[in-house]
Image: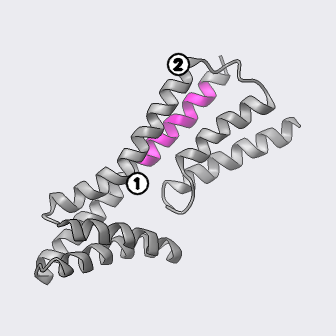
Amino acid sequence: MTILGWILIIALIVVGMAGAVYPILPGALAIYLAFFVYGWFFSFEPFGVGFWTVQTLIVVALFVADYVVGAWGVKKFGGSRHSVIGSTLGIIAGAFFFPIGLIVGPFAGAFIGELIAGSTPGKAAKVSVGSLLGLLSSTFVKIMLQITMVILFFIWIGR
């Protein structure tokens, strides 16, 4: 049972880390679930209120980073609501064409959304670059926060 427990924990952490880049995967929630798997297979004893509070705050920060940072990139470059929606739809559609779709999808979605809003192709291209920069920034933040979650997990159980 020990081996099965660790296989599940490691698999959830790997899926979670992949979810930072590949939006169809659950990301932080998979890592969060790994903590429960550890508790069910081994013990919840190492985890106190402090652990759950910190980890929950990180998960909330990850969700905020996922949505707010991407939208911020579009808005920072003068994008409209249409380009934010287009970028989001592009991320979802692009996920099916991994890995290139994760770059082309939000770029094209923001571009099309901005054209629908009545912008010039030049402005739409500028907004699309902002969308891409927001996505890359958000991905970097997610990776760093998820690595922090995993490191804290191992520190907590190693006490």
Quadrant where the image shows the N terminus: top right
Q: Can residue 129 be found in the magenta stretch?
A: no
On screen, residue 22 versus residue 37, left or right, reads left
Q: Tell me where residue 115 sits by quadrant.
A: bottom left
The spot of residue 18 in percent (x, y) is 56, 56
Mark 1 secondary-structure assignment: helix
154 in the magenta segment: yes
**Circle on res. 53:** none
Q: Of tags 2 and 1, which is closer to the observer? A: 2
Q: Nearer the viewer, residue 22 or 154?
A: 22
Task: Determine whether the residue tagged by mark 2 lies in a helix, strand or loop.
Answer: helix
Badge 2 is on which residue?
Answer: 50
The crowding category of the residue bearing disc 1, from other C-alpha atoms within 10 Å (few below 14, some 14 to 19, many at least 20), is many
Tell me residue 106's x, y (percent): 34, 70
Density class for disc 2 (Cα within 10 Å; few <14, some 14-19, many ≥20) is few
- x, y (%) of residue 155? 60, 24
Q: Earlier in the sequence, mark 2 or mark 1?
A: 2
Q: CA distance from mark 2 to mark 1?
A: 26 Å
Chain part drawn in magenta:
142-155
Q: Residue at x 18, y 59 (%)?
A: 75
Q: Nearer the viewer, residue 62 or 139?
A: 62
Q: Amino acid at mark 2?
A: Gly
- Residue beneath the point at 51% across and 31% down: 55
Magenta span dominant secondary structure: helix
Residue 66 in the image, given as x and y percentages of width and height: 39, 52
Q: Any mark on residue 139, and which?
A: 1
**Residue 110 lies in quadrant:** bottom left
In the depicted structure, whether residue 129 falls above or below residue 116: above
